[in-house]
Amino acid sequence: MKKLIPALFLLSLTGPVVAETPQDIYQERETLSRLLDQVNNLMPIADLAERQSLNSDKRHRFDYVALKRDLITIQYGLTHYLKTPLEPRQLSHDLNGSYRQFNE
């Protein structure tokens, strides 16, 4: 019984199992594509902020190199995921090879 409790706890963390529909997958990819567009738009804004910070003599400076590195990492991850083809769908039933219909 003691070994069963941790297993049940781990299963409860996974949440309900819901089958994805093709529409869900395409909606997710569309949303991630929009997110990638937004991340791509952030790079020029980060460049502008960095240029503007060069004229100031603040004691503490923002780490623009780290910001750009993180943006590039996010861009790469999103691009890699979106360029990966969708997994081929398995047929939900076995083929029987009989395609004749009989009219009664």
Image (cartoon, rainbow, N blue to C red):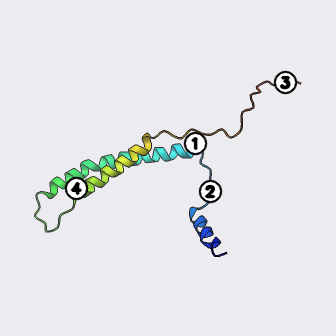
Residue 10, above or below 27: below
The kind of secondary structure element at disc 1 is helix
Q: CA distance from mark 4 to mark 1?
A: 39 Å
Q: Of helix, strand and loop, which one carries label 4? A: helix
Find the distance from the CA under tag 2 to the CA under tag 1. 16 Å
Foreground residue, 99 or 35?
99
Q: Which residue is mark 4?
A: 65
- Does residue 89 sit above or below 56 in this rendering? above
- Label 1: which residue? 22
Report the Cα–Cα distance between label 3 and label 4: 71 Å
- 39 or 9, which lies in front? 9
Amino acid type of the residue tagged 3 in the rendering: Phe
Q: Position of residue 93 (x, y in %)?
A: 71, 39
Q: Which residue is mark 2?
A: 17
| Location of mark 3 (residue) | 102
Mark 3 neighbour class, 10 Å CA radius: few under 14, some 14 to 19, many 20 or more: few
What is the crowding at mark 4: few (fewer than 14 residues within 10 Å), some, or many (at least 20)?
A: few
Q: Amino acid at mark 4?
A: Val
Q: Is residue 2 above or below residue 69?
A: below
Observer-side mark, 2 or 1, equals: 2
Q: Earlier in the sequence, mark 4 or mark 2?
A: 2
Q: Residues within 10 Å of mark 1 (few under 14, many from 20)?
A: few
Q: For the residue labelled by badge 3, is the local secondary structure a helix, a strand or a loop?
A: loop
